Amino acid sequence: QVQLVESGGGLVQAGGSLRLSCVVSGNTFRITGMGWYRQAPGKERELVAFINSGGNTSYADSVKGRFTISRDNAKNMLYLEMNSLKPEDTAVYYCNAQKLFRTPYWGQGTHVTVSS
């Protein structure tokens, strides 16, 4: 099992920044990739950013150039640096970890609210 605990959410004005963190614990062996997803009220959960075991990253078009995903394997941490936040970034943000042939693991989520 893998346990994921997010933190760093909060209320911020448009144009501001937040840094989300995810503590990764448990059986972290063979995690192939990790990501941040978000779910806004009334909408489906969507992928925001992903980083694989080789350090390659990908982003949703809506956050490219504003968000940066990173991981510190030595500290078992995943981060999401969010800049130039917009009201449409308001959502619950979830940390995700993936292993081959396993159901993905999820954290409990952290709320991000961006006021206009």
Image (cartoon, helix red, strand yellow):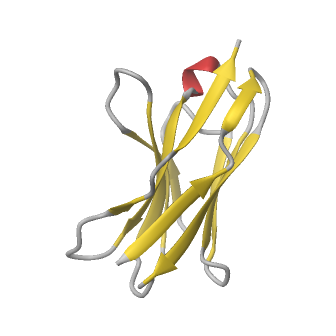
Count of marks, rendered view: 0
Counting from the top left corner in percent of width and height, residue 102 is at 23, 73
State whether residue 107 is above or below residue 59: below
Q: Which quadrant of the rendered structure holds the N terminus?
A: bottom left
State whether residue 71 is above or below residue 62: below
| 7, 31: nearer the viewer | 7
Counting from the top left corner in percent of width and height, residue 13 is at 77, 22
Q: Which quadrant of the rendered structure holds the C terminus?
A: top right
State whether residue 37 is above or below residue 57: above
Counting from the top left corner in percent of width and height, residue 3 is at 44, 70
Name the residue rendered at 48%, 65% in the picture. 4
| 98, 4: nearer the viewer | 4
Counting from the top left corner in percent of width and height, residue 115 is at 69, 17
Residue 44, located in which quarter of the rendered image?
top left
Query: Is 52 positioned to the left or the right of 9 in the image?
Result: left
For the view shown, which residue lies furthest in the left direction?
101
Name the residue rendered at 51%, 77% in the picture. 25
Name the residue rendered at 26%, 76% in the picture. 100
State whether residue 108 is above or below residue 113: below
On the question of residue 54 being in view, the answer is no
Residue 18, located in which quarter of the rendered image?
top right
On the question of residue 79 being in view, the answer is yes
Query: Is 68 positioned to the left or the right of 15 in the image?
Result: left
